[in-house]
Amino acid sequence: MKGSTLAMNKNKFVYTAFLAIAFAATFSACRDKRSTGLEYARNMYDPIAYNPDQPNKNFKDGKTAQLPPAHTKPVGFTEYDEFPNTLEGYQAAGVSMVNPLPVDTVNLAQGKHLFDVFCSPCHGTKGDGQGHLVKIEKFNGVPSYFAGSSSRGGEMKALTAGKIYHTITYGVNNMGSHASQISPTDRWKVVMYVQELQKQQ
């Protein structure tokens, strides 16, 4: 009997202690609406690493986000300073730049895929300037590759590979730069496919 009574008393004590802790946690959370109550393993919420926008005493300027060292390039980065984002640069690219990729079914298929993803929402899957965003009137004035005129002069179907590449890299008018989305090699694949669209009547 004594053993069972002790066990019952022990269970009551544990149960009472649990209720007291639960009540205290609930009460503390209710008192401060912003409080999350008691937290277990707080270190899982507070990362050791600095966030990019946090002050950082490890650097002279006190910032976590640092600029890359001078004269360094990201892996795979291709310089394009020879043809600046000017009308003169555009014209020079049109004369000097030639697509380095062979025209084959693989490159054309990949170019079509990239065009469908990045270009067709405005230019249309057929290159007729009637993409989805044009049809719902988000944009207008998108020229056809085989019937329209370029805002920088000349017919769209006469645009050279270099001019198309330059436009993809820098953008023009409402079209933004796609240099951060499409790698230099993939840009040439898009150029290749656009030049196929130019042949349409």
Image (cartoon, rainbow, N blue to C red):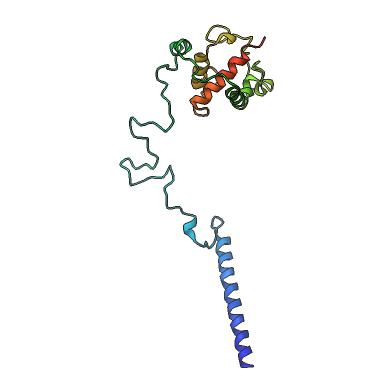
Tell me the quarter of the picture where residue 123 sits: top right
Q: Is residue 176 visible?
A: no
Residue at image coords 61%, 85%: 7
Q: Nearer the viewer, residue 142 or 145?
A: 145
Residue at image coords 33%, 29%: 71
Q: Quadrant of the N terminus?
A: bottom right
Tell me the quarter of the picture where residue 66 sits: top left
Q: Nearer the viewer, residue 24 or 145?
A: 145
Q: Is residue 127 visible?
A: yes
Q: Residue furthest bottom?
A: 1
Q: Position of residue 118 (x, y in %)?
A: 59, 26
Tell me the quarter of the picture where residue 111 sits: top right
Q: Position of residue 54 (x, y in %)?
A: 41, 45
Q: Position of residue 64 (x, y in %)?
A: 38, 43
Residue at image coords 63%, 89%: 4
Q: Position of residue 12 (x, y in %)?
A: 61, 81
Q: Nearer the viewer, residue 195 or 151?
A: 195
Number of numbered markers: 0
Q: Is residue 36 above or below residue 128?
A: below
Residue at image coords 62%, 9%: 148
Q: Is residue 143 above or below residue 55?
A: above
Q: Quadrant of the C terminus?
A: top right
Q: Is residue 62 above or below residue 37?
A: above
